[in-house]
Image: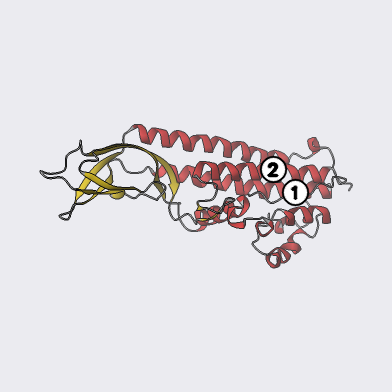
């Protein structure tokens, strides 16, 4: 049967687009759930002073972190990863002109860190046109300038852990502060902005040089927190600074969603338009 070139003839395309729409809803739901949690004022500051004058400002969790955050995140990752597989299936239908297409059982969107690993996936893609296989290879993580920031690699790694091991542990990261410090008796204040913060974790350290005991008017503050995943792999970004990929969890998740959207729609467009010659690029800095 001849290849399909009219997207309206391919009902399978609706599957991956529905998943992308669902992922966008889940992204918004994650932000809403986080906002609801913060409205409960779930943390309080505790000051700890050692005998030698060294002090710490600690974050104590009053309201437990809701499991809902990890569940929403897990479904977000699942929908994005499944959207890629659904897209590849639809592309195979376009190429073959039949549903199911040849080799349907082996189809799986490849995500590879090396050229050797991609070559091992070629047998799964043997019924696709060579230009489509080339397009898939062009967006692999090993083709990116910064593979550890590549959105496809990030998505694949996070989705695999969530699917096969456990929910991702959600934690806090202080990102801003409004400090009250009496500089007459407080010295050597060191903020730990940007570091994972567990229950009882240290937000800042200082040295108290006064007498008569430490009081709230000596040091206090308001802090703004972002939701983050524990144990995120830090690596050098576009500026050379070692940091979490894309900076924040929110930006990381959006980069994944936009990458999947671009990859999927780009591959569909190429499948329906064999004369397209502009190659795709791996999504990352």
Percent x, y of residue 243: 50, 52
Percent x, y of residue 252: 55, 45
In this view, the residue in front, 75 or 233, is 233
Residue under label 2: 262
Q: Earlier in the sequence, mark 1 or mark 2?
A: 2
Decide: few, some or many residues near mark 1? Use Cα within 10 Å; few <14, some 14-19, many ≥20.
some
Color encoding of the figure: secondary structure
Q: Which residue corresponds to the image point at 15% horizontal and 55% vertical from the top-left?
A: 51
Count of numbered badges drawn on the protein: 2
Q: Secondary structure at mark 1?
A: loop
Could one spot residue 227 in this view of the protein? yes
Residue under label 1: 280
Percent x, y of residue 246: 55, 47
Establish if 1 lies above or below 127: above
In which image quadrant can residue 59 be found? top left
Q: Is residue 284 left or right of residue 124?
A: left
In which image quadrant can residue 258 be found? top right
Percent x, y of residue 129: 83, 54
Q: Which residue corresponds to the image point at 74% horizontal and 46% vertical from the top-left?
A: 90
In this view, the residue in front, 249 or 70, is 249
Q: Is residue 155 left or right of residue 120?
A: left
Q: Secondary structure at mark 2?
A: helix
């Amino acid at each position: 049967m001849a290849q399909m070139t009219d997207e309206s003839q391919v009902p399978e395309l609706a599957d991956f687009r529905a998943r992308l729409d669902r992922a966008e809803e889940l992204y918004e739901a994650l932000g809403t759930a986080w906002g609801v949690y913060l409205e409960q004022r779930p943390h309080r500051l505790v000051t700890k002073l050692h005998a030698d004058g060294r002090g710490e400002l600690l974050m104590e969790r009053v309201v437990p972190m809701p499991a809902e955050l990890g569940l929403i995140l897990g479904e977000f990752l699942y929908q994005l990863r499944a959207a890629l597989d659904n897209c590849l299936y639809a592309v195979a239908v376009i190429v073959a002109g039949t549903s199911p297409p040849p080799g349907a059982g082996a189809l799986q969107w490849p995500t590879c860190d090396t050229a050797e690993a991609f070559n091992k996936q070629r047998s799964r893609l043997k019924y696709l046109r060579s230009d489509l296989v080339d397009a898939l290879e062009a967006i692999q993580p090993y083709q990116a300038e910064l593979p550890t920031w590549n959105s496809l690699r990030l998505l694949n790694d996070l989705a695999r852990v969530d699917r096969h091991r456990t929910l991702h542990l959600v934690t806090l990261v202080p990102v801003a502060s409004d400090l009250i410090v009496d500089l007459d008796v407080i010295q050597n204040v060191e903020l730990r902005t940007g570091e994972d913060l567990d229950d009882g974790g240290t937000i800042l350290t200082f040295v108290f040089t006064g007498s008569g005991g430490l009081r709230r008017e000596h040091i206090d503050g308001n802090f703004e927190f972002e939701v983050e995943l524990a144990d995120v792999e830090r690596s050098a970004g576009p500026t050379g600074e070692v940091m979490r990929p894309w900076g924040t969890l929110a930006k990381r998740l959006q980069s994944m969603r936009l990458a999947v959207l671009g990859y999927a729609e780009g591959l569909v467009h190429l499948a329906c338009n064999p004369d397209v010659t502009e190659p795709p690029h791996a999504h990352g800095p």
